[in-house]
């Protein structure tokens, strides 16, 4: 037998052996598990999910209920598809579901076990969350650095003005990515990470999006653990190049700051200074340079891609709905005034703008299945038992389009959020709207994300009108999306800016 054929045959035997070992456990627990579709031998329900698992799982939930079980290879997976079930997972039993199943692709990152996104709910994770909540993303800290963000927004506006004067079209995603990258880098490091006119912006955008795309790609190693050592799809090897490059970039910035602090130069009072302060106050085991690098990696990857994707969908919906665009521009004109720059202190006075962002995140959630949770123990939910180590998905996409909670759920209607006040906010207190998750695992950078999104959207529509290419009609804009860790547009949005003339 040829070596290659022998290897394939050996892998097949290993898979079959593990399948038999799991069969007894599956049968013994099946009666206690939430109901779900009967899967095929070995592969379970994998083939049913297809390329749009959030939609496939939503359809299955109509048959099997809002708490159902699917078998993905050898993984028992429980899916919550209603606000009530989301509350059971994310609030009532959140301590039991603090764990994360770590995708094989994430292990390609050096020191991945230090990531606040993937750590289990242990002492290390609680310490990192405390640093984020008590020292980094505080109102006082964000307020102190808002001047830097305002400068970045003014720079973006100038770039759009230049494009308008030249009659050039703008890729909204590329523009927002570059601006977001600089917003984050200034908040973290007090410096631009890239020259805004450099082609490196597009290159780095592709690097981070590549990480997100690969991280969201179905990986056989996650469904058949025996295949992990072989990396049969090459996903782990491919993504490691991008991870390593990003780490090198952050290490260079960290080295520069260490030299600055050692030289006695004035503090920058940005996130990096705060993180070094925390490192000095705690033991090396609790928080060190490696922790700082991984935390910054989490913030850059999570912050740039999700913000860019949300903004591209928001601008797409506004261009498709000129009447809604007109209402948003009217609110900005009456509240801010013509030609005035938007500042973060203005955001609370722009309720329709906030409604626009909420409606965008409802209809186009960047993480349709949120990040998966893992049961740390056997948990009883609504009379069913979710076994220890089972992974749990909360289908935020299905919940946000459920007619039980939303009138005309597939239509873009920002007015639905007007008058709700704090009843439906971004903090996951209303489980029919959880774009950032909820409970202890809610996105730690939520407060910064809302500030950046509000500034970006307000700046793009306050000073400019936008025209589609080739006299395209608004209703002809392609709305196709592609599933991954984030839900990106298949065809990027490109439009021509026109500086608004003074009335």
Image: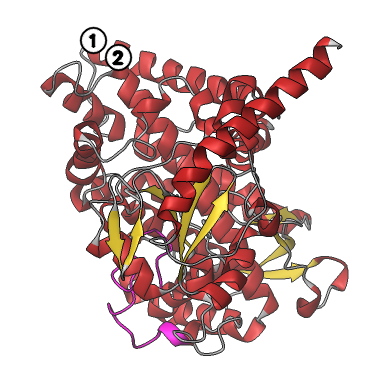
Q: For residue 444: magenta?
A: no
Residue at coordinates 62% horizontally, 74% vertically from top-left?
318
Q: For residue 436: magenta?
A: yes
Q: Mark 1 points at which residue?
A: 262
Residue 427 at x, y percent in the picture: 31, 64
Q: Which quarter shows the C terminus?
A: bottom right
Q: Which mark is residue 258?
A: 2
Residue 297 at x, y percent in the picture: 44, 31
Q: With respect to residue 170, does 429 lie above or below?
A: below
Q: With respect to residue 130, does 334 lie above or below?
A: below
Residue 108 at x, y percent in the picture: 53, 24
The reply to whether dot 1 and dot 2 touch (C-beta < 8 Å) is yes
Residue at coordinates 75% horizontally, 70% vertically from top-left?
467
Residue at coordinates 30% horizontally, 14% vertically from top-left?
258
Q: With respect to residue 361, does 257 lie above or below?
A: above
Say how many tags the image has.
Answer: 2
Quadrant for residue 451, please give it.
bottom left
* Label 1 residue SS: helix
Disc 1 to disc 2, C-alpha distance: 6 Å
Residue 232 seen in the figure: no
Label 2: how many Cα within 10 Å (few below 14, some 14–19, many 20+): few
Residue 365 seen in the figure: yes
**Residue closer to the observer: 328 or 32:** 32
**Residue closer to the observer: 186 or 106:** 106
**Residue closer to the observer: 409 or 93:** 93
Looking at the rendering, the stretch of residues picked out in magenta corresponds to 416-437
């Amino acid at each position: 037998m040829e070596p290659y054929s022998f290897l394939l045959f050996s892998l097949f035997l290993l898979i079959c052996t593990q399948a038999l070992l799991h069969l007894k456990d599956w049968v013994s627990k099946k009666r206690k598990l939430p109901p779900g579709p009967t899967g095929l031998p070995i592969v379970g329900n994998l083939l049913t999910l297809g390329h749009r698992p959030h939609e496939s799982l939503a359809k299955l939930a109509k048959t099997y209920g809002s708490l159902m079980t699917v078998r993905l290879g050898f993984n028992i997976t429980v899916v919550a598809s209603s606000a009530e079930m989301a509350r059971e997972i994310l609030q009532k039993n959140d301590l039991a579901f603090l764990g994360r199943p770590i995708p094989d692709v994430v292990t390609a990152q050096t020191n991945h076990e230090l990531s606040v996104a993937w750590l289990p709910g242990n002492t290390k994770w609680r310490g990192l969350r405390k640093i984020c909540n008590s020292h980094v993303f505080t109102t006082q800290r964000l307020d102190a650095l808002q001047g830097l963000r305002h400068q970045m927004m003014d720079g973006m506006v100038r770039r759009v003005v230049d494009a308008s004067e030249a009659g050039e079209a703008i890729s909204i995603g590329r523009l927002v990515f570059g601006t977001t990258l600089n917003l984050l880098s200034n908040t973290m490091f007090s410096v631009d990470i890239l020259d805004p006119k450099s082609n490196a912006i597009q290159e780095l955008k592709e690097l981070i999006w590549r990480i997100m795309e690969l991280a969201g790609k179905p990986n056989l190693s996650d469904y058949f653990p025996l295949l992990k050592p072989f990396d049969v799809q090459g996903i782990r090897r491919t993504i490691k190049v991008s991870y390593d490059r990003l780490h090198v970039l952050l290490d260079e910035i960290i080295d520069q700051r260490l030299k600055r602090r050692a030289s006695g130069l004035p503090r920058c009072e940005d996130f990096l200074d705060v993180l070094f302060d925390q490192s000095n106050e705690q033991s090396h085991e609790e928080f060190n340079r490696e922790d700082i690098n991984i935390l910054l990696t989490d913030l850059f990857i999570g912050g740039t891609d999700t913000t860019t994707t949300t903004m591209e969908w928001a601008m797409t919906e506004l261009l498709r709905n000129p009447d809604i665009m007109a209402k948003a521009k009217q609110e900005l004109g009456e509240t801010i005034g013509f030609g005035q720059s938007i500042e973060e202190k203005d955001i609370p006075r722009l309720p329709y703008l906030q409604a626009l962002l909420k409606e965008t995140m409802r209809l186009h959630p960047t993480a349709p299945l949120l990040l998966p949770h893992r049961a740390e123990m056997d948990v009883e939910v609504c009379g069913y038992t979710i076994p220890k180590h089972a992974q749990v998905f909360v289908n935020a996409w299905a919940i946000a389009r459920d007619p039980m909670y939303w009138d005309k759920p597939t239509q873009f209607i920002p007015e639905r959020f007007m008058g709700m006040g704090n009843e439906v906010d971004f903090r996951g207190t209303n489980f029919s709207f959880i774009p950032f998750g909820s409970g202890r695992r809610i996105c730690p950078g939520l407060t910064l994300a809302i500030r950046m999104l509000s500034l970006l959207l307000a700046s793009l529509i306050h000073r400019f009108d936008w025209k589609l290419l080739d006299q395209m009609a608004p209703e002809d804009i392609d709305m196709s999306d592609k599933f991954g860790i984030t839900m990106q547009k298949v065809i990027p949005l490109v439009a021509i800016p026109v500086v608004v003339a003074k009335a």
